[in-house]
Structure formats: structure tokens, C-alpha cells
């Protein structure tokens, strides 16, 4: 068995890709002493808090489903969300309006009238409806219903000695507090293979009848960015029906317009269940204990009917969570920085460990994730195709490809509609959407209509998959997607006869989304990615025994060079006042050698560019994956000290809170977590053509890096 393995600057490296990609579940060093103590690494970053961060929940989840809680271990005082990859809802269409009414907006593109998915001012109703629908919704809120000794309702300030720990190794949250001097302990876990939480509440107050658990269901809001999802007072817009009730189980049918889903409940301690009539809400239910000092239950959500009495018990959920999380931490790659003398090592390692946890909770499911994972609903909960790279590439580099691969079916699934989209624009191949939900329907918007850097992504992912699994099966799996992606890229490039070259745009919205789409031409990142994509697609044709596509070679050979002004790269060709007006938003010019392998890049020019960006870009006006992108650029161009500085930058736009959630951009911003993990993997294991061990880390002795089972980057 071969392993892509390194341990403290020892071991073999970059043998061949077949050797680099074995999906091993455990360490494979030169002996037992070489293995990383993975549990020790994880447990030294156990999350311990004593209060609720009202915008940052502690979470349990399984990648497709997540449950956010406050300091009580449930959603008692803060209405955090319960979200799933299947929880989509659409409001009814306005009277007399049909989806087919929207046909796009014609824009002159080199003498041709091409329809783009822009907001149509002549059809505002359908344009706005398409923007808002479908949207992700909150499955329901679960919290403690508590009374004080005098019978009054408990408020958050009534609790004392609050304490909460997330056991990252087990994926279980342990919460405790005191009420009227009595201790309350709550254990919260998520089933690894079901949208279900198991909860146990233990306290003398349970026996006294002063603690119950409420279940409350909201109607969706129309807001695009919302911390707490749903309207709990729109009683008449939806239905919650207690359809089946057993001795220790219950089933609730939820209906919201055309959306129907089910909630099932099973408890194993004495209790009664029914509608919480005193609340005045027909959508609020109460599980009330009737004996003993413990209340233990499992609550599950599903788009299909469930047998409530067949649900696992809370204890079984705890055991399943422990087993699944232990398997996760023991799988794939690991890194240990504790031997370092640079005082920043522990914070970087904390970010690495917590990022793995929150990404596994929020972003390892059957759909590409949205920017804010399953915490809330940024952009109505839709996912962005251009951001799939930043959410998922780390899984491949950390040797956990299966957690990324399960969502990549969107490319073959969306291929027919993407071909239709390209045909409607008079181009061949497939034009991938920018922002969608669980089916392919674009949201009308300028940034969505003109953005193009999502187009080569599936070629990059296919190449990752092939390097991990160099088989005919992988070639067959991806070939149609790769070829259709490349064909659209070739047709998109416009031949400039005066210059005897191919150009990109206008109109084009670039990575930074901060230039005039109708004036921007030859953006640097997109030019670099076009070169990579067409070059790699030709390699795929050769692997399949097919001749090279002449048109693709023509575009490759005559594609405009990366734009340079005053000996440094610039954002796009001819950009005015580059360093006085455009040093904000994503510095994508640093991504052409770092995130990308560097097609068309002159390394000396890039180094000058990166140095200028580091000196002159406004670090308080960039965010998220920008810092890992610059770290990767620094690593590839031979400046590992700068790479570390970027991953530990002091900007408020790139910090990680107590739960590991990343600041910068709409809250929270998971591409920051994914970017961090991608950069760390690259800096440890290296990239095509890199030399030596841990090439992205400084060699001055301040960083001692143990790492194992990573996969080199392209």
C-alpha cells in the first residue's frame, strides 16, 4: 500500500499520483511512533463556553442536517435554526404570473443580441419571485420550557453557573446550568445517517414537573439574509397536525403551501405529548415529563413519513455519533503543530481543527453548501457554483474525497439544463449556473448573469477525481461534463481580428465583482483559469483516445496574455487607476498562481504583484477565502513566511470565533474555513513541482510540522 505521507520532514513525497492518493483511514508512517495522536490534537481544542453567542450557535450535525443550540443545549432562549439539504420552500406565484414569463434580457455582445439572466424591469413580479424562490426554511425549534419555584416563566438571566462543552471527538454537546440552585444537565447529539437529534435532560427539576421541552414550527420569511429563520406568528399560513400519537411516540405533519414534511418524536422516559394550548399557537407542542429525574427523546425530520416508534433512542444516537465522529477524525489526513516554537501555532491548529468540525457538520452533504452552511440562510439559502471550489476542494486534499464527491452529482444532473442555457445564448457546450437551489433555475441578477469563473470548476474537480482514481470509470463519469464545459469556454471567447487574439468579455463580472461588467475585458484570473481548463480538457480527450479539439487549441494558442501594467499583473486589461480605486474586494490576481497552478504566469512578475498587493490592498475590505488564496500564492511563489501571515492575519474580516465560525462577509462565511483547510493541505503536502517537505511552511525552525495522508495539489 502506498501513502501520501509526511512526518516532521521525513518520508517519501510526490512519488507518482497512484502512490499519492490511497484513501487510507489511518496513519501509515514508518512505525507506530510516527503516527500523530489525532485524539490529542482534536481534544486540546475542545470548545468550552459559559454563555450564548446570539449569532453563533454551537452545532451538532451530519453534513446534510444541522441543529444549532444556545447555552442550554437546545434552542431555549435563542431561536437558532434546524436546517437540512432538503428543506426548500417556494411561495405561491403572484396571480396571473408564470415562471415561463421570464425569458431573460437581451444585451448586445459583439454585435449579437444575447439573452442574459438579468432582473427584467419590464417583468418585475416574476423577476423578484425567481430571486426569492426556492428558499431554505427552518424545520422547527426545540427548547426547554421551564418555570421557577414561584411558577413564573424562566428567563435567560435566571440561569446560573452556565457551562457548555462541544466534545469534538464525539460530536456531542454537553450543557449544564443551575436554576433555583438545582443543576440541569443536557446532552445533545445528531444521528450520523438521519436528520435527527437525540437529547437527554437530567435534573431534579424534571421530577418536579418544572422542565418540559417545546417544539415550535415557523412559516418561512421572505428575507434574503436572516439570522433566525421563520415567522412564529403567521399562524394561518401553514398547518401542523398531530397525526399519530403512541404511548411513547408522536408524528406531526407539516404543510406550508405546496411543501409538506414530517416530524417524528420518540421518548423513552415517562412523559406526555400534545399541543401547547396555553401558548396560543397551533404550531407549538410540549413534551412534559411525568416521573423520574430524566427526560430523554429523539426528534427526527423528513420529507417522507417516518415510523416514530422505530427511531433510535437518544442513547443510541449518542453512541452512533461517537462512532461516526471517531471514524471521521481517524480518516484522511491530520496535522500536528504542537512542536512549533512560533507562538501562533496553537491558534492556527485551533482554526484547523474547528474548521474540520464545522465543515463536517454543515458542508458534507448531497448538495453543494451555501455560504453560511446550515447555520442560517444567506442568499435565501442557495448555493453559489463559483464557490463550490472553496467549500469542497479541501476534502480531496485531506484524503476525504467521498465527502466532496457526494455533492458533485449536480454537474451531470444540471448538464441538460446547462446545455439548454448555452444554446439559448447561441453557444455550444454547457453554461453552468451561478446561484441555484436543489434544481437548475438561475436567479436573475447582474452578477449571476455575467459571472464566468465557475465555468472551469468541474474540469478542476474531474482532474482531482482522476488523480485520486485514475480509472476508465472516472473518465466515463466526467467526460461529458468536462467536454461540455470546455466547449462553452471556447465558444465564449471572442475572436478579436484586429489583434489576432481571443478575448474574454465584455460583458463579464469578474471574481471581485467590483468593476463595470460592460467595460471589463480580459480579467486576469479568468484568463488563467480558461488556460487551465482548456489545457486539461485536451488531456482528457487524449486519455480517452480521442483527437485534440482544434477549436480549443486555437483559443488556447491565441488567448490574450495575462494583463500587466508597470511590471505587475492587474485585475483586467486596461483597468484605470488600478492601485488607487480597485484595491478592495477579492484580489483574484493573486489566485492565478496559488489556487490555480499558474498557466500563463511569469513567476517573477507574480512575486512583484503579490508584494504590491500585500502592501497596498485594503485588508479591511477583503474577506473570507481571500486570505487563504494569498497564502497559497505566497507558498507557490516561495514566500512561506507570508503564507503563514495570511492564514493568521489580524483583519477582523478573517477571524474564527469560539465555535470555529469565520467572520468576514455575510455571517458566517464557510469559504473561509474551506480555504484555510485547502491552504494548509497545500502548504504541508505541496503541489505539482514543489520540492522538499512541508514546502509552504518556513524553514527557520520555528514551525515543526507533523502531517500525514495529505494529497498534493494540482
Image: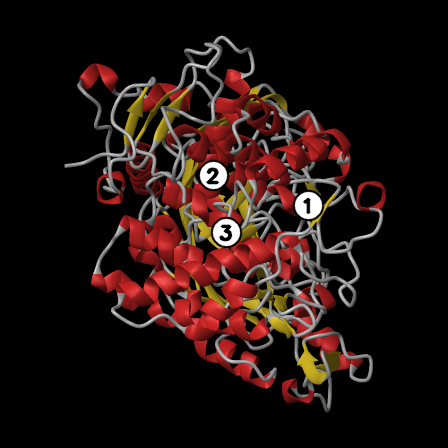
Q: Position of residue 372 (x, y in %)?
A: 60, 48
User: Disc 1, disc 3: CB below 8 Å?
Assistant: no
How far apart marks 1 and 3 lie (CA) works out to 15 Å
Q: Which quadrant, please, contains the C terminus?
A: top left
Q: Which quadrant, please, contains the N terminus?
A: top left
Q: Which numbered dot is residue 678?
A: 2
Q: Nearer the viewer, residue 20 or 410?
A: 20
The answer to which image quadrant residue 441 occupies is: bottom right
> Which residue occupies 51% across, 47% down?
596
Badge 1 is on which residue? Answer: 586
How far apart marks 3 and 2 lie (CA) works out to 10 Å
Give the secondary structure at mark 2. Answer: helix
The disc, 1 or 3, on the residue closer to the chain's N-terminal end is: 3
The answer to which image quadrant residue 655 occupies is: top right
Vertical order, 95 against 602 (above or below): below
Residue placed farthest to the left in the image?
1
User: Disc 3, disc 2: CB below 8 Å?
Assistant: no
Vertical order, 562 against 361 (above or below): below
Neighbourhood count class around disc 3 (C-alpha, 10 Å): few under 14, some 14–19, many 20 upward: many
Q: Nearer the viewer, residue 594 or 369?
A: 594
Badge 3 is on which residue? Answer: 389
Q: Nearer the viewer, residue 668 or 172?
A: 668
The answer to which image quadrant residue 446 occupies is: bottom right
Q: Is residue 270 visible?
A: no
Q: Nearer the viewer, residue 177 or 386?
A: 386
The disc, 3 or 2, on the residue closer to the chain's N-terminal end is: 3
Amino acid at each position: 500500500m502506498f501513502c501520501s505521507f509526511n512526518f516532521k520532514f521525513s518520508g517519501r513525497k510526490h512519488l507518482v499520483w497512484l502512490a499519492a492518493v490511497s484513501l487510507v483511514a489511518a496513519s501509515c508512517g514508518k512505525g507506530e511512533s510516527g503516527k500523530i495522536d489525532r485524539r490529542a490534537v482534536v481534544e486540546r481544542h475542545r470548545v468550552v463556553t459559559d454563555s450564548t453567542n446570539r449569532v453563533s450557535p454551537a452545532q451538532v450535525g451530519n453534513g446534510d442536517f444541522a441543529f444549532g443550540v444556545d447555552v442550554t443545549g437546545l434552542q431555549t432562549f435563542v431561536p437558532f435554526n434546524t436546517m437540512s439539504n432538503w428543506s426548500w420552500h417556494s411561495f405561491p406565484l403572484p396571480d396571473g404570473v408564470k415562471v415561463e414569463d421570464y425569458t431573460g434580457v437581451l444585451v448586445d455582445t459583439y454585435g449579437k443580441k444575447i439573452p442574459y439572466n438579468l432582473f427584467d424591469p419590464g417583468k418585475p413580479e416574476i423577476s423578484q419571485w425567481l430571486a426569492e424562490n426556492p428558499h431554505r426554511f427552518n424545520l422547527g425549534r426545540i427548547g426547554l420550557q421551564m418555570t421557577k419555584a414561584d411558577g413564573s416563566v424562566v428567563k435567560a438571566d435566571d440561569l446560573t453557573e452556565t457551562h457548555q462543552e462541544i466534545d469534538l471527538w464525539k460530536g456531542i454537546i454537553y450543557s449544564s446550568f443551575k436554576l433555583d440552585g438545582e443543576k440541569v444537565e443536557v446532552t445533545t447529539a445528531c444521528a450520523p445517517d438521519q436528520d435527527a437529534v437525540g437529547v437527554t435532560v437530567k435534573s431534579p427539576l424534571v421530577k418536579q414537573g418544572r422542565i418540559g421541552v417545546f417544539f415550535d414550527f415557523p412559516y418561512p420569511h421572505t428575507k434574503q439574509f436572516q439570522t433566525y429563520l421563520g415567522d412564529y406568528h403567521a399562524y394561518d399560513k401553514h398547518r401542523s397536525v398531530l397525526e399519530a400519537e403512541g404511548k411513547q411516540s408522536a408524528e406531526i405533519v407539516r404543510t406550508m403551501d405546496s411543501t409538506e414534511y414530517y416530524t417524528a418524536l420518540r421518548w423513552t422516559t415517562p412523559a406526555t405529548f400534545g399541543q401547547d394550548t396555553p401558548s396560543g399557537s397551533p404550531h407549538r407542542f410540549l413534551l412534559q415529563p411525568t416521573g423520574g429525574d430524566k427526560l430523554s427523546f429523539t426528534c427526527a425530520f423528513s420529507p417522507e413519513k417516518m415510523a416514530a416508534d422505530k427511531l433510535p433512542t437518544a442513547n443510541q444516537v449518542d453512541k452512533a455519533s461517537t462512532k461516526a465522529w471517531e471514524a471521521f477524525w481517524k480518516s484522511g489526513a491530520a496535522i500536528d503543530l504542537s512542536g512549533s516554537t512560533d507562538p501562533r501555532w496553537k491558534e492556527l491548529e485551533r482554526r484547523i481543527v474547528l474548521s474540520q468540525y464545522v465543515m463536517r457538520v454543515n458542508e458534507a452533504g448531497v448538495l453543494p453548501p451555501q455560504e453560511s452552511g446550515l447555520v442560517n440562510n444567506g442568499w435565501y439559502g442557495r448555493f453559489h457554483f463559483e464557490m463550490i471550489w472553496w467549500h469542497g476542494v479541501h476534502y480531496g486534499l485531506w484524503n476525504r474525497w467521498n465527502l466532496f464527491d457526494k455533492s458533485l452529482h449536480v454537474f451531470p444532473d444540471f448538464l441538460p439544463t446547462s446545455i439548454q442555457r448555452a444554446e439559448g445564448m447561441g453557444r455550444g457546450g454547457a453554461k453552468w449556473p451561478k446561484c441555484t437551489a436543489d434544481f437548475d433555475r438561475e436567479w436573475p441578477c447582474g452578477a449571476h448573469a455575467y459571472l464566468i469563473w465557475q465555468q472551469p470548476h468541474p474540469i478542476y474537480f474531474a482532474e482531482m477525481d482522476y488523480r485520486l482514481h485514475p480509472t476508465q470509470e472516472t473518465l466515463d463519469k466526467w467526460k461529458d461534463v468536462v467536454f461540455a464545459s470546455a466547449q462553452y469556454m471556447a465558444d465564449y471567447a471572442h475572436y478579436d481580428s484586429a489583434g489576432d487574439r481571443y478575448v474574454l468579455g465584455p460583458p463579464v463580472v469578474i471574481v471581485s465583482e467590483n468593476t463595470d461588467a460592460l467595460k471589463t475585458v480580459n480579467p486576469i484570473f479568468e484568463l488563467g483559469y480558461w488556460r487551465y481548463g482548456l489545457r486539461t480538457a485536451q488531456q482528457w480527450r487524449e486519455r480517452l483516445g480521442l483527437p485534440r479539439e482544434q477549436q480549443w487549441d486555437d483559443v488556447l494558442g491565441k488567448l490574450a496574455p495575462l494583463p500587466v501594467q508597470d511590471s505587475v499583473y492587474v485585475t483586467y486589461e486596461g483597468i484605470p487607476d488600478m492601485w488607487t480605486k480597485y484595491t478592495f474586494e477579492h484580489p483574484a490576481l493573486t489566485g492565478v498562481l496559488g489556487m490555480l497552478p499558474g498557466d500563463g504566469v511569469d513567476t517573477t512578475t507574480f512575486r512583484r504583484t503579490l508584494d504590491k498587493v500585500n502592501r497596498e490592498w485594503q485588508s479591511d475590505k477583503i474577506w473570507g477565502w481571500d486570505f487563504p488564496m494569498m497564502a497559497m500564492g505566497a507558498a507557490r511563489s516561495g514566500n512561506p513566511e507570508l503564507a503563514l501571515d495570511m492564514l493568521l492575519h489580524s483583519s477582523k474580516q478573517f477571524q474564527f470565533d469560539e465555535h470555529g465560525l469565520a467572520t468576514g462577509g455575510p455571517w458566517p462565511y464557510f469559504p473561509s474555513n474551506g480555504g484555510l483547510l485547502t491552504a494548509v493541505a497545500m502548504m504541508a503536502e505541496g503541489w505539482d513541482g514543489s520540492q522538499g517537505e512541508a514546502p509552504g511552511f518556513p524553514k527557520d525552525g520555528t514551525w515543526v510540522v507533523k502531517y500525514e495522508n495529505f494529497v498534493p495539489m494540482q
